[in-house]
Amino acid sequence: MSTIWQSLELLITRGLPMTLLLTLGLLGTGLLLGFPLAFLQVYGYRPVRWLCRGYEQLFRGVPALVLILIFHSGLSRTFDILLPAFASALLALGLRSSAYQSQIFRGAIQSVGEGQMLAARSVGMSKTQAIRHIILPQAFRLSIPPWTNEFSSVLKDTSLASAIGVLELMKQTTLIFTRIQFIHGAQWILVILMLAALIYWALTYLGNVGLSFLESRMRIPGFETKGQVER
Amino acid sequence: MKKASLAILVLTLVAGLWTVAAVGETYKVASDTTWPPFEWSDAEGNLLGFDLDVMRCIGVLQGFEIDISSYDWEIIFDDVGSGRMDIGASGATIRPDREEKVDFSAPYWTSDQAILVRADSELNIITALAGGYTVGAQLETTGAGFITDLIAAGINVTLVEYTLYPLAVLDLINGNIDAVIQDEPASVASATAEEDISVAGVIKTDENFGFFVAEGDPKGLLALINDGVAQLKALGVYDNLIAAYMGTDLVKVEAAWRASIGLLDDGDVVGFASQLATLANE
C-alpha cells in the first residue's frame, strides 16, 4: 500500500507539473494562433484563405508523434536547430492544436447567421466592428463545447512528449514502473499504469467540469442561433 | 482578454526556459534511467546508479556541474551527437557504428551478455539461442545486435525488440517470448527481483562501456572524463562505487545513497564513495 502512495506522490510531484505546463502551453499556443486563423479563413482575401487552409491541412494531416520527432530530431539534423525537448514538444503539439482549434472557431463563426453581419453593416458598423461586437461574442459561446473536446484530446497528447525525454506524467510513470519491477516484480507495472490512467482521467474530468461551468455562465437565456440568409 | 494574456504568459515562460537552457557552464548529461544498477530513478525521483555517480564524482574533481536528464535509449546517441546534450552516461558499449555519431571515452567497465529464461523453463543458453525460440532484447542494444548476427549466420532464432528493457522481462514472464538477452548486471538485477525468471547463462562478449560526447569533442570533455576516471581509481573511489552498486540490494543502495549524497555535495568524493559502499553492503 505504501508503495502505491509513494508512487502516486512521485507522479504528482515529479510528473504532473510538466503535464499541466505542457497542456496550458499547447492550448494557449493553439488559441493564440487558432482564433486569427479561423477569422482569416472566413473573412480573409482569397490567397490568405488558401494559405491558412494549407497550414491547417498540413498540421491536421500529420500524426502528432511524427511532428514531435520532426521538430526534435529532424530540425537538428537538417538545419542545426537545437530546440530543448520541452520547446520541440510545445511547438509541434501547439501548432497542431492551432490547426484543430482553427476549425472549431471557423465552425462557430460560420454558424452565426450571415444575416447578422448584413444587419450590422446596414446600421453603419465597419466589417471589423461587426466581427468584434456581433460575430465574436456569439462565436465564442458556440465554440466552448467543441473546445472542451480539444482540451480532452490535447491533455492526453502531452504523453507523446515522453518520447523525446520530456519528464512529464508518462515518462515519470515509465521510470517508476521500471524501478518497481526490479524491486517488487513485474505485476506492479499494471498498477502503476492504472495510477497514471487515474490521474489523466481526473484531470480530464475536472477540466470538463470547469468548461461546462464556463459554458453555463456564458449562456444567454432565450438566445438562439438560427436564420440563414438565402442568397 | 484573459486567455490571451495567459497564452502570452506561457510563451514568456517558454522563452525563459530557452534562455536557461542556452546559458550556464553546466554540462547536460543524458541517461536512459531504466537500467539498474547503472542508472535508475529511486522512490523519491532521485537519479542514481554507477554511471551517474561516476559522472558526479568526476564533476566534483574537475570542477564542473552536471545536470542529468532521463532519456529514451533510442535517441540518446542522436541527441549527444547533435550537441543537444553534452555527455552520454548510459552503460553504452563502445561500438564502431556508434562511433560514427559520437566519440567515446576510454573504457570504464567491461560487461558480458546474459540470457534470462523463465525459472520453470528447460532451456539452457545453447537451446534458447539455437532451438528456434523467440528472444527479446531492447532496441539498438548490443544484445539485439548479437541475435541479429546469429540470424544472419543462419541460426534458427527469432528476435523481438522492445523500447524498454523491463517490458522485455514482462513479456518473458507472461510467456510471449522464451528468453531475454541483456547485459549481465541488469539481468542479475531482474532475476533477483523476480522468482519466475532465472539467468540461463552468460555469454563472454567482453564489451567495453564508455561515456560519450559529440563527435570531435567540441567542448574538450573526454580529457576531463578520462583523467577523472583515472583519479577515481587512484583514490579508491572507483572500487567503492563498484562495491556499492554491483550485486547489492537496490532498496538498500537507494537508502545508502540518500544518506551519503550530502557528502558529495560538500565536495567529499572519497567520503561519499566509502560511506555508500559501507551502507549498501551492511
Image (spheres, coloured by chain):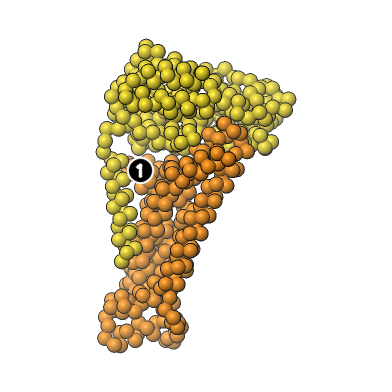
How far across and down, in percent of the image, does residue B225 sit?
Answer: 35, 22
Q: Label 1, on which residue?
A: A84
B277 sits to left or right of A86: right
Residue farthest toward the front in the current orientation of the protein:
A2
How far across and down, in percent of the image, does residue B228 sit?
Answer: 34, 19
Instruction: Please tell me which residue is depicted at 42% across the width and 72% down the height of the picture.
Output: A217
Q: Quadrant of residue A130?
A: bottom left
Q: Nearer the viewer, residue A209 or B202?
A: A209
Q: Amino acid at mark 1?
A: Pro
Q: Nearer the viewer, residue B72 or B274?
A: B274
Mark 1 packing: few (<14 Cα in 10 Å), some, or many (20+)? some
Chain ID of residue with mark 1:
A
Instruction: Please tell me which residue is depicted at 46% across the width and 56% down the height of the picture.
Output: A154
Q: Quadrant of residue B176?
A: top right
Q: Quadrant of residue A82?
A: top left
Which type of secondary structure does the marked residue at label 1 adopt?
A: loop
Q: In the picture, which chain is orange?
A: A
Q: Quadrant of the N terminus of chain A?
A: top right
Q: In the picture, which chain is yellow?
A: B
Total numbered badges shown on the rendered structure: 1
